[in-house]
Image: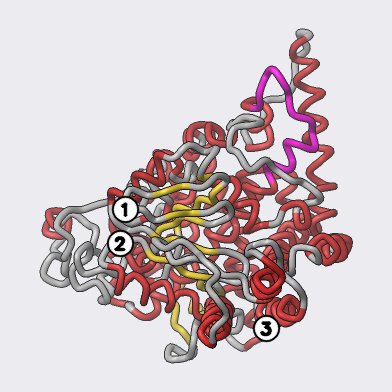
Amino acid sequence: MDSLVLLSLLAGVLSWCFVSGIGKGRGLRAIAWSSLFPLSSSPTLTQTYPAFTFSHFVTPFLRRIRSWAYLLNGQKIIQEGYNKSKDEPYEVLAPDSRFVFVSSPKHIKEIDSAPDTVLSLNAAAKHMLQPVYTMNGFNWFDKRGVEGVGFVRTLRTLLTNNIPNLLPELRVLSRSRFSQLHAEFSEKHGPDHSPIYPMIMKITVLLNAASLFGTELARDDAFLKDAFGYVEETLLNAEVVKLMPSFLAPIVGGLLSSGLSSHKSFFAKLLPMAEDRLKDRELKARGHDVPNHADCVQWIMETAPRANPWSAERIIYELMAIWFGSVHILSTTIVYVIHDLCLHPEYVQPIREELETYYHEFETTGKGLPLLDSFIKESARLTPVEFMSTRRRALKPFDLSDGTNLAVGDWACTPSGAIMRDERHYPRATEFNGFRFVDPELLSRIGRQSSFPTPQPKPSKLTDIDNTFPMWGTGRMSCPGRFYASAFMKVIIGNIIMDYDCKLVEPDAPRWMTWRSAMIPREKTMVTFTPRDRSKMKDGKSAL
């Protein structure tokens, strides 16, 4: 990921040297200055161009400098804005966007209730990922639902209902792959030493491929390598393109996309599967017997608009978008949970006891394991993958009730990381309390209440949607795949807890870097995984 920073900063230097847009002011002077230093109005002020003064030169220059500072200090800037805002909207500038952050329930509801034709999640995702340059030429619509929203039913209903069928296989795959990687990394880095981020990424890619595409592709090592590379290439290339001046973006994006080997191979290997499924659908309609499939390829095809059925290519484009989001978020969240298990080992034993007793029930239903659930949620609260949530990009001008204006292209969003560290929502907010969200009665029953504080006024689950825990977004567009994500993470983390004792090699060393609003794990962070003696487990056995 260090290459992401270097190349993106290089892109920044280039875009600083070239014109980034004109026509925002009146007259030649305004055009020149607005091109070199695009102004973004403060949330409640109308932008004007007064007579030239010294401040007229300095102010846009400083604002431009501050927008570039966002790249490396985005989380700090968002947090500082939140601390000063007193729940009022505030703006943060980036080189390519103006963000308006809202945190009050009233303003969050206004954003969530705005029509998709005005504030669009699709348009925000399109800007983030630059799919025309990073997803094999796919350029989705800015407006949600133009081609159907079958992916929502696929993730929220079909995939969620299939979780109990997936979990036994995911458990087996997780254990075998972890054991394999543990041996490989131990040989390379020293006894029991593993770079945690690359390790978890590879395990996530394997298990996610089995869930979304089926076991046949998941057994293809070349496909898994391309699936892994696709995520890395998307992150890197999208960042470079976003930092280019608008007139250079198509040129640079085209050059970059021509070299995306993983994207091309990933697409090429998925395409025959989608074509075969479409043929099977035609055969089934004629009365022939065809194989039954329970994976996202099948579900995306079945939930696509019937009036205008999707081609095999269009099905794969949808899967590529789902794949990127799931692999990136899942792997990063799991890495931070492992970090916290190393830093807070007092939680390991009660979670192990829960796994020994209740894992089979979890695997049967896809629900449960409240101690592990709470630990993951607390880890995600204090080390969120993203400091920003509820993203919407303005397709039309939009005004909040207090008069704050979003121009076309501006973003509305919530400062999720700051909200989740607010003492008003989380007593002792900066302290790690792994069982913060557990029902105190449960801790009392297992004799753990005196050992672990539960400062929250009421228990909650990782998958709960709430304005004070916006990890999954908020309102009507909250993440439809969160139930799958929760179960997926519990399988991998549960296996590690049951099979290994883990310890950070350098617990005081930096474990992540920040880029924009994201926290990206450092690839060189090492964890020792010492195999446990399973014969000493409770009753000498475990459901895992």
Q: Magenta residues, as a range?
A: 304-319
What amino acid does circle 3 point to? Glu
Res. 402 mark: 1
**Rendered image: mark on residue 187:** 3
From the viewer's perspective, tell me whether residue 399 is left or right of residue 4: left
Residue drawn at (76%, 81%), measured in percent from left and top? 17
State the CA–CA distance, disc 1 to disc 3.
61 Å
**Vertical comparison of 369 with 498: above or below:** above
- Which of disc 3 and disc 1 is earlier in sequence? 3
**Comparing labels 1 and 2, the label whose residue is closer to the camera:** 1
Q: Position of residue 254 (x, y in %)?
A: 85, 60
Q: Nearer the viewer, residue 487 or 121?
A: 121
Residue underneath mark 2: 88
Percent position (x, y) of residue 541? 39, 58
Residue 363 versus residue 333 in the image, above or below: above
Q: Residue at x 80, y 63 (%)?
A: 247
Q: Amino acid at mark 2?
A: Glu
